[in-house]
Image: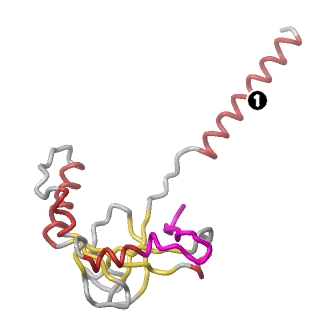
Amino acid sequence: MRADEKKKLILAGVLFALAILFFVLLGPSEREALVYFYDESEQKLFTAPVDSIPPIKGINDGQLDGVRAIVIAPNGKRGDKSARRIAYLEKWSPQFKQHMEAVAQARADGRAMPNIVDRSQRKFHQFVRRVESPQWHALNTDEAAQIIAVLRTKDANGKTPDICKPNP
C-alpha cells in the first residue's frame, strides 16, 4: 500500500470516529420530558411526565391533588431557581380528563378515537387558579383571563417572564 493511500485510509478512519462521537454526544436524549405539578395538600412542586393529565396523584398519597403548575422567572433568569415562582395552576374537568386518557390509550393501542369534546368546548373543561386562591375559574371567564395575563405582563424593563421547565 502506498503512503498516500495509507494517509487517506487513516483520515477516513479518524473522520468516521469523529462522526460516531458526534452522534453519541449530540444524538437524541433518552430523558423523559417533564413539567411542573403542584401537590395541593402538601403545597409543594414536583415533576411528572409532560403527557400527564391533571389532576394526577400527588406526592404524599393516592389523592388526585396534583395539578399542573405554570412556573415562571424574570426574563433571562430561567436557570435561577430562587427567581422562579408559580404563575398559576391548571387542571381539567373529570369528564375531559377521562376523555383525554381514553384518547391517549387509543393512540397507544393504534386505534382511532373520535373527538367527543370539540376544541371550542375545551375552555369549559379547563380550570385555572392562583396558588393563594382556593377558587378555580373556567378558562372562558374574565377571572381566568386575568390569571393567565401574568404570562404577558411586562416587568420594569419591558420584558415578559420566561416559562420554566424542569429539564431543558
For the N terminus, the quadrant is top right
Who's the residue at 67% across and 40% down the image? Answer: 21
Question: Where does residue 108 sit, x and y in percent of width and height?
Answer: 24, 49
Relative vertical location of residue 63 with respect to residue 74 in this rendering, above or below: below
- Name the side, left or right, on which 147 lies relative to 111: right
Q: Quadrant of residue 93?
A: bottom left
- Name the side, left or right, on which 132 lies relative to 111: right
Relative vertical location of residue 17 with respect to residue 75 in this rendering, above or below: above
Which residue is under mark 1?
14
Question: Where does residue 113 sit, x and y in percent of width and height?
Answer: 14, 49
Who's the residue at 28% across and 80% down the image? Answer: 143
Q: Quadrant of residue 47?
A: bottom left
For the C terminus, the quadrant is bottom right
Badge 1: few (under 14), some or many (20 or more) residues near its Cα, within 10 Å? Answer: few
Q: In the displayed image of the protein, which residue is found farthest to the right?
A: 3
Identity of the amino acid at label 1? Val
Q: Nearer the viewer, residue 79 or 144?
A: 144
Name the image colouring: secondary structure
Q: Dot 1: what SS?
A: helix
Relative vertical location of residue 56 with respect to residue 130 in this rendering, above or below: above
* Principal secondary structure, stretch drawn in magenta: loop
Image: magenta residue range: 150-168
Q: Nearer the viewer, residue 30 or 123?
A: 123
Question: Where does residue 122 sit, x and y in percent of width and height?
Answer: 20, 63
**How many badges with numbers are in the image?**
1
Who's the residue at 42% across and 67% down the image? Answer: 35
User: Magenta stretch containing residue 159, yes or no?
Assistant: yes
User: Magenta stretch containing residue 27, yes or no?
Assistant: no
Who's the residue at 30% across and 85% down the image? Answer: 61
